[in-house]
Amino acid sequence: MFHDMKKLIIALLLLIPVVGYSQTTQERYYIYNIVSFEGDFTKEDFKVYYDNGSEVKRLRDDKGEKIKFKTPAGALMYFLSQGWEMYLNGATSKGAMAGGYGASSTSSYWILRKPCTKEELENAVEKSVKK
């Protein structure tokens, strides 16, 4: 009986990695949102724009009022509180030179994502394709 119990325990131990692997291979789906800014990060009341795949627009509350933030951290906390997670952040730069003088500007952005169902992703893709 002890020998049979030992075989059962070994069999169960061998199955644990298989069961664990099968649970982690489920496909995950995400919708993405690109957040960009206008204004100086070191000054208050900069403007926040977001791209939801179908349009780029100013961030507004439920009443349609434009939302302004005191700091970039405030904007980030707002999006995190809405269920978004930071996926990537970066910046783009552009510049020009004329007559020996140059100027450049940098625009920061965040790519946020939120878990969704396959159907929600397919719906978002359908809305984002220009026809």
Image (spheres, grey):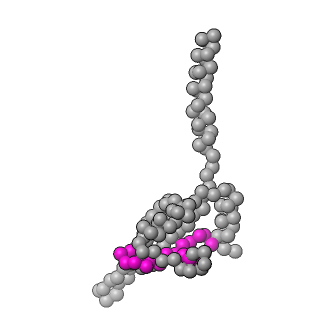
Quarter of the image with the C terminus in it: bottom right
* Numbered-mark total: 0
Q: In percent of the image, x 57 and y 75: which residue is there?
A: 61
Give the magenta-colored segment's residue range: 41-60
Q: Residue furthest left?
A: 100
**As drawn, 17 above or below 78:** above
Q: Is residue 92 visible?
A: no
x and y percent of residue 85 in the render? 52, 59
x and y percent of residue 130 in the render? 66, 74
- Magenta region includes residue 43: yes
**As drawn, 110 above or below 49:** above
- Name the foreground residue: 56 vs 80: 80
Image position of 9 (left or right of 35): right
Which secondary structure is most common in the magenta stretch? loop
Q: Residue furthest front?
A: 63
Q: Is residue 61 visible?
A: yes
Quarter of the image with the N terminus in it: top right
x and y percent of residue 78 in the render? 50, 67
**As drawn, 108 above or below 8:** below
Q: In percent of the image, x 61 and y 16: which residue is there?
A: 5
- Name the foreground residue: 114 vs 121: 114
**As drawn, 88 above or below 98:** above
- Name the foreground residue: 8 vs 111: 8
Q: In percent of the image, x 55 and y 64: which residue is there?
A: 82
x and y percent of residue 55 in the render? 60, 75
- Magenta region includes residue 98: no
Q: Quadrant of residue 43?
A: bottom left
Q: In percent of the image, x 42 and y 75: which residue is there?
A: 70
